[in-house]
Image: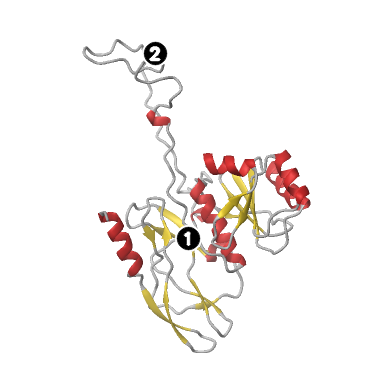
Amino acid sequence: MDTLSRRDVLEWAMAESVPVRCPACRREHLFAAPSYPCVCGAPVTPPLDRLADPAPVTHRTWDEDWVTVPCDTCGRADQWPHPELGCPCGVMLRIPVRGVRRPLRAEVVPGTGAPADLETEPEPEAEAGPHTPGPPPPGTAATTPGSPLIPDHLPLPRTTPTPRPVFQPVAIRTARDAVTAAALYLRWLGYRDIRRADQRPPSGIGLAARGMLAQVDPTVRPATLRDVECLWLTAMSESTGCVYFSLAGYADDARGRAAALGIPLFVLDLTGTPQPVNTHADELLATGA
């Protein structure tokens, strides 16, 4: 076992636990925050605040359901579900965390309207004039496309996509778990700034990311033709792509319309792993964002 794997195992095994007392029934629990996989492969665990009291969840908003936590290994900051505990008395408790920020979508660069975490590439340096490549140095072979060293049918190393790590699902027990699983899957595909969609869909819950609008249907009925068409119309009005996640599958006419409109369809199994059900979903899984 390599060094990183040993450290990951220790971090997972030594998850921070805190005593939690329910304010309604005064029952005490020992709670350990769940860990989530960073894109670098290391586990990320929201740090629990031992000094603050848990708060009952009376209503849900995106800003309160998600927190931004940095990875201790690579420093990357991502959004993760706010730790919660269900008491047997029926009260859902939101466990306080320390040293974390609210979702990244709330952080805007003043005067630009752009998210502060927007990943931008440095602009290439300006050249003084047209550049004409000279002959290769003595003793070196040419490395231009079409040469024996770099055939035309192979991508250059800098254009080869970085392989994604194995997707780590979250078991689905509630409707919120289904939304969490879809959000984690979108992030795994490469989409950023995932948030609740501005327009509420006729059924299910809408998620939005850069360049993608997703609908998550956690109900026990198959998604209908109207559900698929409404998602497509909303995406067209926002000039973005769209994808559908359903827990109970799709009606036959909904599948046919999704195939004609180019909408990827996924079914969420109870392990939290979305399964593609049409060719558009297969293509999205293969290419990512």
Q: Answer with the quarter of the image where residue 101 lies.
A: bottom left
Against 148, residue 204 (above or below) is below
Which of pointers 1 and 2 lies earlier in the amino acid sequence? Answer: 1
Against 185, residue 133 (above or below) is above
Which residue is label 2 attached to?
130
User: SS class of the residue under badge 2?
Assistant: loop
* Residue at (57% x, 75% y) in the render: 57
The amino acid type, in three-letter code, at marker 2 is Pro
Colouring: secondary structure
Instruction: Report x, y in % for residue 56.
Output: 55, 78
Instruction: Report x, y in % for residue 26.
Output: 49, 89
Instruction: Report x, y in % for residue 167.
Output: 47, 53
Residue 207 appears left or right of 170: right
| Discs 1/2, front | 1
Circle 1 Cα neighbour tier, 10 Å, few/some/many (<14 / 14–19 / ≥20): many
**Residue 258's mark?**
none
Badges 1 and 2: C-beta atoms under 8 Å apart? no
Which residue is at the front of the view, 82 or 165? 165
Which residue is label 1 attached to?
80
* Residue at (41% x, 15% y) in the render: 146
The amino acid type, in three-letter code, at marker 1 is Trp
Residue 239 appears left or right of 153: right
Q: Visible in this render: residue 289?
A: no
Which residue is at the front of the view, 105 or 272? 272
Residue 224 appears left or right of 106: right
Q: Residue furthest bottom?
A: 26
Against 262, residue 52 (above or below) is below
User: SS class of the residue under badge 1?
Assistant: strand
Q: CA distance from mark 1 to mark 2?
A: 48 Å
Instruction: Report x, y in % for residue 215.
Output: 65, 53
Q: Visible in this render: residue 162?
A: yes
Circle 2 Cα neighbour tier, 10 Å, few/some/many (<14 / 14–19 / ≥20): few
